Image (tube, rainbow, N blue to C red):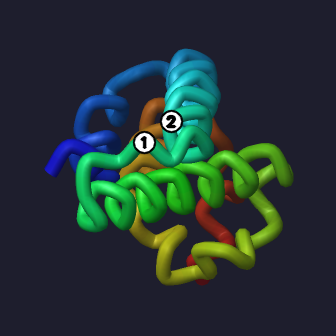
């Protein structure tokens, strides 16, 4: 699957937090632009892009909220997809442990 959120996480989990945020913003802008053009090859591709965009945007909103507000578009279950990524940043000291309190 071309627009796979789990593969995106795998590609970015080892990056430093600041680098990941910059990449996340770039990727979201790229996918948002593609989505808004509505130039899909199939209905399946449209759904993949829509979901990928939703999860990237939700995670970006969570980061922009100061790691406090659960994004309404993906909810806590959608945010759990990024738990391993957040945990990795906490383990490396890029983020404080409070970044994970939303999962308590």
Which residue, given by chain and number where applicable, does mark 2 sit on? 34
At a point 62% along the width and 30% down the height, the residue shown is: 29
| Sequence-wise first label, 1 or 2 | 2
Residue 59 percent coordinates (x, y): 60, 54
Question: SS at mark 2?
Answer: helix
Q: Is 53 drawn above or below residue 29 in the view shown? A: below
Q: Is residue 69 above or below residue 12?
A: below
* 93 and 20: which is toward the camera: 20
The quarter holding residue 100 reads bottom right
Q: Residue furthest left?
A: 1
The label shown at residue 69 is: none
Does the image show residue 58? yes
85 with respect to 69 (left or right): left
Residue labelled with disc 1: 39
Q: Tell me which residue sits at (28%, 56%) in the image.
A: 45
104 displayed left or right of 65:
left
For mark 2, does the 10 Å Cα neighbourhood hold few (<14), some (14 to 19), or many (20 or more) residues? some
* Between marks 1 and 2 in the image, the one whose residue lies nearer the viewer: 1
Do the numbered discs 1 and 2 sit on residues whose CB atoms are within 8 Å? Answer: yes
Give the alpha-carbon distance from disc 1 to disc 2, as whole Å. 7 Å
Image height of 93 relative to 54, above or below: above
**On screen, 47 above or below 39?**
below
Secondary element at tag 1: loop
Q: Residue 64 appears at what percent x and percent y? A: 80, 45
């Amino acid at each position: 699957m071309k627009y796979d959120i789990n593969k995106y996480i795998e590609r970015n989990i080892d990056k430093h937090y600041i680098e990941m945020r910059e990449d996340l913003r770039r990727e979201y802008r790229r996918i948002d632009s593609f989505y808004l053009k509505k130039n899909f090859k199939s209905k399946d591709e449209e759904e993949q892009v829509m979901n990928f965009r939703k999860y990237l945007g939700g995670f970006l909103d969570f980061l922009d909220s100061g790691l406090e507000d659960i994004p309404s578009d993906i909810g806590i279950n959608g945010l759990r997809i990024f738990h391993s990524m957040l945990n990795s940043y906490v383990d490396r000291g890029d983020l404080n442990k409070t970044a994970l309190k939303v999962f308590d």
